[in-house]
Image: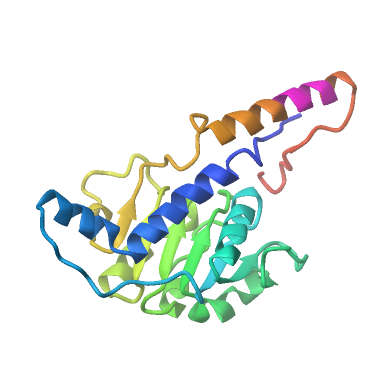
Amino acid sequence: LLTNASGSYGHAICEHMMGMILSFNKNLRFYYDRQKEARWTPLFTGREIYGSKVLLLGVGDIGTEFAKVLKVLGANVTGLRNSYKEHPNCDEIITSKELHDVLPKMDYIITSLPATNATFHMLSHDEFSLMKEDAVVCNVGRGSVIDTYALLEALDNKSIGGALLDVFEEEPLPADSPLWKNPRVMITPHCSGGYHWKSVQDYYTQLVIRNLNHLKNQEPLENLVNRTKGY
């Protein structure tokens, strides 16, 4: 029997990525650099989450937390999952069959998908070519979901607006990767989740205790891994 820690990381990872999105939208990196130089340089450009259209690739633990926050901030949220089962915090649910239909409408594409055969390079050349020129792609799931070369091509061609990345196909990200120096890319080193966050520690610990008691009492375990699906 194998179980996973699903449910533990949603809060921490959601806060991390929302911080990246807000920093990108409000030019906070630019202002931080100007602060170090004591330069008063207002920019009258930026983006809002309010009124935007967001596609969540995956609405499990992490995607659910995104959906809650995005709805509070006034976004229209579309969730992608394996079935058309409704989600309380999504305005619409699609499956992978409709992915190409909705991509041209989306302002943000956020993926928290696991690494499986079905999700490998789910976002590649065809998908980036369908996105809006100012669309922002965010990944806190697994790096293999995004085709790195296709992403670099989309950024170079300015066919998308930017990328906010916490995970990569190759980790650590090589020092010579063009992603490091692209001004429309934000990078964090796969640190959005992890046991150092109190919310993770609390949920994970209680989950392990519950499953030990389930095992002792010969009860079904929580978060039992489906080896066919890979998660």
50 magenta-colored: no
Look at the image and tell me in which quarter the N terminus lies: top right
Residue in the picture at 50% in, 56% down? 145
Q: Main secondary structure of the magenta part?
A: helix
Check the image and report above or below for 179 versus 85: above
**Residue in the foreground of this view, choosing between 134 and 150:** 134
Can the viewer see residue 100?
A: yes
Can the viewer see residue 141?
A: no
Residue in the picture at 75% in, 68% down? 84
| Residue 191, image x, y percentages | 42, 39
**Residue in the foreground of this view, choosing between 111 and 89:** 89
From the viewer's perspective, is 71 left or right of 156? Answer: right
| Residue 33, image x, y percentages | 17, 53
Residue in the picture at 67% in, 72% down? 91
Q: Residue 96: which quarter of the image?
A: bottom right
Which residue lies most toward the right here?
218
From the viewer's perspective, is 180 left or right of 74? Answer: left
From the viewer's perspective, is 70 left or right of 85? Answer: left
| Residue 178, image x, y percentages | 23, 56
Q: How many marks?
A: 0
Look at the image and tell me in which quarter the C terminus lies: top right
| Residue 181, image x, y percentages | 21, 55
**Segment colored magenta:** 208-214
Check the image and report above or below for 20 versus 159: above
Q: Residue 202: which quarter of the image?
A: top right
Which residue lies most toward the top here?
216
Residue in the picture at 23% in, 62% down? 183
The coloring applied to the image is: rainbow
